[in-house]
Image (cartoon, grey):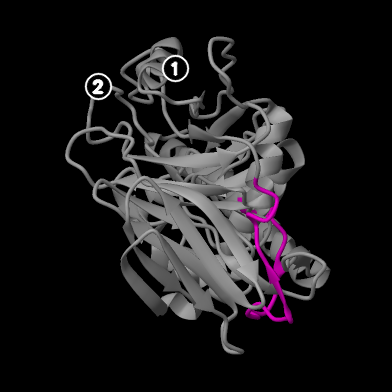
Amino acid sequence: MSRPRRGRRLLAIVIVCLVLPYALPPIYRLPVSRPFTGAYLWNPYEGARGRWLRANLHAHGRAWGGVTNGQQSDAEVIAAYRAAGYDIAGISDYQSIATMDTMPTVPLYEHGFNVGKHHQLAIGAQRVDWIDFPLWQGVHQKQYVINRLKQSSALVMLNHPAKLHSYTEEDLTRLTGYDLIEVANGQVMAEERWDAALSSGHTVWGVGADDTHDVTDPDRTAVAWIMINADSTSRADLVNALRAGRSYTVSRTAGTPTAGRLAIASVVVKDGTLTVTCLDEPATFSFVGQNGVIRGTSADAMSASYTFTPADTYIRTVLRGTQTVLFLNPVLRSDGFGPAMPVADVDPLRTWLLRFAIAAGCVAMLWRVRR
């Protein structure tokens, strides 16, 4: 066999190996965007009690022989967060669940090995899922990955959605099944994507995290985190609190690492009015609603209120202090039975037509090269 013919055969085999996995995901019937409705205002902080726990769930240690660029071992990363005053530190190595006994955490890992940075945090993971689409992902591939991760993990978070536009605003209005979104990845914010999801009726809570690969880098460590209202640091209590939305994101604005003094005292909804009270220092309050529009502000205050109008589908509160910014989870309109949870189902006919077309194309290519 000539060298050009061997080259063509090898190229054909490589193309088939890259294309065939795209026959795995079904074609989904994705739900139509519908803003939150209902006479009831669902307050995720209504059940808050006990102390708030400072947590970072997205940090990388040295894994896979250093390929993932983690500069310290998992144990050293945990020790650095303990020294910084964190109650919970999660090691989110790529495709690997770190087992740590030195600090309260929850089993998790960062899923994804693709050029588009379509990554997810599998929280409460029981095992690692190895299915991914390295070169390209459309909305159906992304939905398929989310659905698979939900089978082996308690919660799924979409990581750094603004990085390389890995999850666009349109994606977030159509995808279903994701529980959390990383609104603060280090110093990179994704508020507009969060508002796109909320405005389309998707109940998703915000998370802040460092995504550090080097805990000695002050620009990537203790930059963004979450405060979780949980009864303990056990896996079950942390997962339940995150699922219920009893948490808020903190983003550091000071030049040097600091936890900041600004904290939440209470979030109360009564007679259609949302009242947020903070601790330790006054803040500027912003009330953000449908499509990310600021519906009200209050400057230099320890407490601020906003009264829902019939047009308000949700309201989330942002507090700006001297060293930190706090992003609270939204109060949502509901029918009284809990927040809306849109679900995507499978279109069987279009799915099998696509699979047949992919299989036929691969067979035709191999047959042609073989001849």
Q: In which quarter of the image is residue 285?
A: bottom left
Q: Which of 182 and 309 lies nearest the eye of the viewer? A: 309
Residue under numbered circle 1: 78
Q: Residues within 10 Å of mark 2 (few under 14, many from 20)?
A: few
Q: In this view, does 29 lie to the left or right of 145?
A: right
Residue 191 position within the rendered picture, expressed as x and y whole percent measured from the top left: 40, 63
Q: Is residue 149 left or right of residue 17?
A: right
Residue 41 colored magenta?
yes
Q: In this view, does 42 lie above or below 36?
A: above
- Chief secondary structure of the magenta span? loop
Looking at the rendering, the stretch of residues picked out in magenta corresponds to: 22-48
Task: Specify which label sits upstream in the sequence, 2 or 1.
Answer: 1
Residue 125 colored magenta?
no
Q: Quadrant of residue 303?
A: bottom left
Residue at 34 percent across and 41 percent down: it is 261
Amino acid type of disc 2?
Thr
Q: Which of 268 and 295 lies nearest the eye of the viewer? A: 268
Q: In this view, does 178 lie to the left or right of 83?
A: right
Residue 11 position within the rendered picture, expressed as x and y whole percent measured from the top left: 46, 43
Q: What element carries label 1?
A: helix
Q: Which residue appears farthest toward the bottom when viewing the image?
A: 310
Q: Quadrant of residue 193?
A: bottom left
Cα–Cα gap, marks 2 and 1: 13 Å
Q: Is residue 195 above or below residue 290?
A: above
Q: Which of 246 and 346 lies nearest the eye of the viewer? A: 246
Q: What element carries label 2?
A: loop
Residue at 73 percent across and 68 percent down: it is 340
Q: How crowded is mark 1: few (under 14 residues within 10 Å), some or many (20 or more)?
A: many
Labelled disc at residue 226 = none
Residue under numbered circle 2: 216
Q: In this view, does 336 lie above or below 144?
A: below
